């Protein structure tokens, strides 16, 4: 989401009635869950593609 979109969303949230606020809250929570799942999947793919990059190098 662009910064402008976030600002507009929050402005709309401030102006909304309680029912609309709940709908917006649940929408945002749902989006968070979707992105967390996508990021986890992306991380697993990246690690499987190049497992050496994710390892900490041991000091000699």
Image: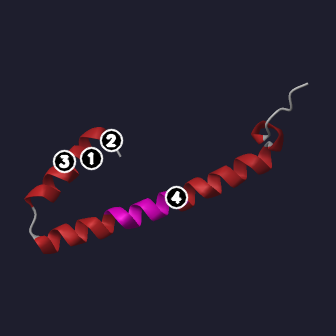
Q: Is residue 24 placed above or below 1 in the rendered structure?
A: below
First in residue order: circle 2 vs circle 3:
2
Numbered tag placed on residue 2 in the rendering: 2
Numbered tag placed on residue 8 in the rendering: 3
First in residue order: circle 4 vs circle 1:
1
First in residue order: circle 4 vs circle 3:
3
Element under disc 1: helix
Q: Compute the Cα span from label 2 to label 3.
A: 10 Å
Q: Point out residue 56 in the picture as x, y percentages from the top left corner.
A: 79, 36
Identify the residue shown where x is 12% and y is 71%: 18
Pointers 1 and 2 in contact (C-beta within 8 Å): yes
Identify residue for label 4. Answer: 36
Identify residue for label 1. Answer: 6
Left or right: where does residue 37 sit relative to residue 57? Answer: left
Q: Compute the Cα span from label 4 to label 1.
A: 18 Å
Q: Is residue 19 placed above or below 54 in the rendered structure?
A: below
Pointers 3 and 1 in contact (C-beta within 8 Å): yes
Q: Point out residue 36 in the picture as x, y percentages from the top left corner.
A: 52, 58
Q: Please state the extent of the stretch shown in magenta in the rendering.
A: 28-36
């Amino acid at each position: 989401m662009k910064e402008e979109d976030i600002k507009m969303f929050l402005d709309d949230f401030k102006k909304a009635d309680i029912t609309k606020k709940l709908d917006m809250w649940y929408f945002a929570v749902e989006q968070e869950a979707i992105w967390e799942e996508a990021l986890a999947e992306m991380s697993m793919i990246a690690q499987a593609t190049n497992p050496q990059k994710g390892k900490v190098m041991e000091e000699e």
